[in-house]
Amino acid sequence: MKTKPIAAYRICSSRFVLRCWEPRDADALRHVVDENREHLRPWMPWVHDTLEPLEDVLQRLREFRANFDLDKDYVYGILDPTDTVIYGSSGLHRRGGEGSLEVGYWVRKDVVGQGLGTAVAAALTRAAFEVNGVHRVGIHCDVANAASAAIARKLGFIEEGILRQRMRRADGVLRDEMVWTLLADEYRASAAASAPIEAYDVLGRRIL
């Protein structure tokens, strides 16, 4: 009997590939983060002050893969269509409770402003509803992160409110967090529903 896939392991479009991180990506990823440290630091508290040791990044990617396979959390690399150049990272996270996933993403500074973040968020939103079968998808961002808020708004997410002092920056300062959501009965009318993507399961079978 054919079983319904739980998650997409690979999501493709003409502009990018989203896939589960692999150990072989560790060295390239740590250099991308290091080269974009000042770009990422205001929004990503995990960014280090120096080049992170290869062993630490390797261990984190192994944990990402383990959580992916156990359906605990889905962290995807964002790569170019040839699957060789890292553009950033993204994910579908289970921190919003049962029946929901939260979209997360960051991209390199040299590809900002090209619509890549919007396209990635749309692809993940479509996968969350059509593959994972959730009821709600969320996007959370710092109130000062106008770019992320614009992505949520463009894709049809609704701003539910602001959680006060819920996000801690790298410098320790607490920031307010915006909460955006899209429900299953709103999804078909959203821009995300027409995202031009293909999705594949863990065996490489097309599921979307």
Image: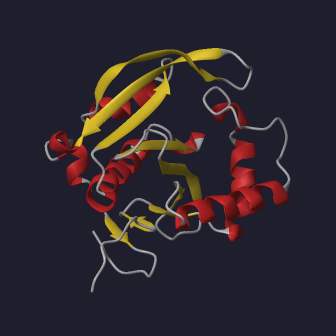
Name the residue nearer the viewer: 93 or 78: 93
Establish if 6 lies above or below 155.
below
When asked about the image quadrant of residue 64, the answer is bottom right
Q: Is residue 79 left or right of residue 160?
A: right
Horizontal and vertical percent position of residue 31: 75, 52
Please name the residue shown 59% across and 68% down the image.
84
Q: Is residue 170 visible?
A: yes
Q: Is residue 160 left or right of residue 7?
A: left
When asked about the image quadrant of residue 137, the answer is top left
Horizontal and vertical percent position of residue 183: 24, 39
Horizontal and vertical percent position of residue 81: 46, 66
Establish if 106 lies above or below 128.
above
Q: Is residue 155 visible?
A: no
Q: Quadrant of the N terminus?
A: bottom left
Please name the residue shown 48% across and 28% down the image.
141
Q: Is residue 25 left or right of residue 56?
A: left
Name the residue nearer the viewer: 32 or 191: 191
Name the residue nearer the viewer: 163 or 104: 163
Please name the residue shown 73% across and 19% down the image.
172
Q: Is residue 183 left or right of residue 78?
A: left
